[in-house]
Image (spheres, helix red, strand yellow):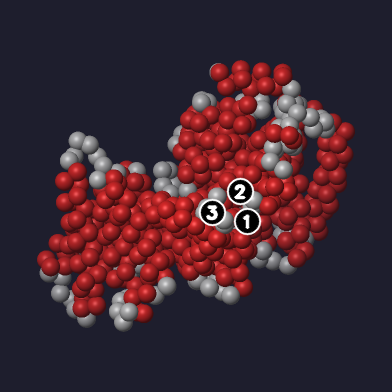
Amino acid sequence: MRVFAAILAACLPLLGIAWIFNLPEMFGQVYITEQYLAVILGLTVLAGLVLKRQPPVPFAVDLLFGIGALAGWWWLALNYQDWLLDPVNRGPEKWVPAVIGIVGLFEATRRHCGLVLSLLGVGFMVYGFIGHFAPGIFEAAYLSPPRYLLYVYNDSNGVPGLVLGVGATQILGFIVFGAVLTGVGGSAAMTDLAMAAMGHRRGGPAKVAIFASSLFGTLSGSTVANVMSTGVVTIPMMKKSGWPSRYAGAIEAVASNGGQIAPPVMGATAFIIAEFLQIPYAQVVLAALLPAAFYYLLLYRQVDSYAAANGLHGEPRETLPRMGAALKGSAPLVLPLGVLMYFLFWLGYAPGKSALYSSGAALALYLATKGRALSGLKELPGILVRAGETLIPILLVCAVAGIIIGTINVTGLGFALTLALGKIAELGGVFPLLATTAVIAIVLGVGMPTSGVYVVVAVLLAPALVRNGIDITSAHLFILYFGLLSMLTPPVAIASYAAASIAKSDMWQTGVTGVRLAFVAYLLPFVFAFNPALIMNGTWLEIGVSCITVYAGGHVLAEVLARKSAFGGGWSRWAAAAGGLLLFSATAIVAPATPWAIGAALIGIALLILLAVQSRRGAAPQTEISNETLNKGAKDARS
């Protein structure tokens, strides 16, 4: 059974590679995109049902159910071109396979992505069938059941549509790339580089976690997967060096979550944003650059301040990899990333194809290494299986997102939501609208993968933001940020809880600590919603003023959150927090090119100089870990 499931999983990336490189046409076979999407989705549903069994249900039942769902989607692929010429006929030969295929999709989604997403998809389908009975502005247009069912089943605005297309091409390419990098030692090289660069610094293991998780997170496409892969190394290292358990877990969770908003890959969500906005992928990367930089800079600032206040030193240099050796061994990471950048930005290839060329370069380098040719070929099936298993939940999310998008389009629900949120803006202004959107995004994002969070929330809420004057790119990034913050926000902070399980810390305390460490992610979207200069949409003066005020204000807030004695403690600490918040949001309150904003930037520069001088005076020497610190870490680990 396990071998059969592994073969099915390995077939998914192989099928995607064949489609991306246009192999069917080379053999004289011409298919349209929707046919390919139906084929790969049917295979995904079958593989998903077989891989995640539900005892005591016998394997034979899962297999028969999966084959039925596979047949339902492959029937669509087989007949798609004929059905394009016969859209009026909606007989049982069409809707019966649709029912079987969609039911199989929901069950596979429940097993791999949780009950929340599956119920969300079911809820939208229920609305599609009976939404015409809803009261007020939420009354849907009436559609006969066969018409609605076939719309989400076979229309290019439904399941075999934009989002599944991105998942089965662009995201698939990067999933393969990530699996190949891990298989050839790229992730190990990444960890060695992080250890060599940051391990000896104040609070070093925490800085290693930030560095390694940011690099791995942008490629992995899953915050929890990132936590579980890098956290098993970084969290015990942090605890050993004296970090409290809750801080060790929270730092890893926050750093891993930031990978989903960090260019160049952004957990593959950047490609979906580019498709939604119909703009070049490079433009999305450029827009996301400054917010992601501030996210990590201010996380680093908090970690450094906490380490300074609590006497947490770095690891002894002799226990760390040498930078020269780490750089020498970084070829499995650096060369493929260089090839990726070359094909993606210099030649302008499609992202999925660029990722596959980079995967080929990584594999070729590994196989060319002395003595590795035979072992490398033996590892190839394992790489394909890992890529397929990672791909299954992503494709399922994309397919359910197609149902949601199709329902919103055909029922008019999107217009109703835009109207409802528009009334909030009329009553209280744009800020209440943004706050409401943020809360909805966090709630809807609970338990959903990155791409699913973004797609669902963007389709539902982005039009209302744009209609009320928010820049369209700012609106989509705002939604992405708050959708991802569901991973860190209690009471259902999945990333923090996963890290807490490794750190053996209290889950609630870890979640609350994660919110403090990620404060910039809660504040920054409001700033760039009002001030698009932070996403590179403005003059150089506006961008410069915005960067200075955000970093200076964030620096003050980081000090306040990291040290209880910051700025003297007591009321002066609260006053400093208020001042830092005001400076942070200065360019959201007034335009960044105004004298008031420029004055705030000058104050910010002076404040940064003052804080730097104070930090040098009070800096602890960079020595190896003391016995007292080790004892403190051991005591905390036991607690």
Tag 2: amino acid: Ala
Cβ atoms under marks 2 and 3 closer than 8 Å: no
Above or below, comparing residue 202 to residue 287 in the picture: above
User: Residue at horizontal 29%, vertical 71%?
Assistant: 35
Marking on residue 626: none
Rendering quarter of residue 76: bottom left
**Horizontal side, residue 512 vs residue 618: left or right:** left
- Check disc 2 and report its element: helix, strand or loop: helix
Residue depth check, mark 1 versus mark 3: number of the one nearer the observer: 3
Q: Which residue is mark 3?
A: 371
Q: Which residue is mark 1?
A: 331
Front-most of 440 and 134? 440
User: Residue at horizontal 66%, vertical 28%?
Assistant: 241
Q: Residue furthest front?
A: 371
The N terminus - image quarter: top left
Cβ atoms under marks 1 and 3 closer than 8 Å: no
User: Residue at horizontal 28%, vertical 65%?
Assistant: 39
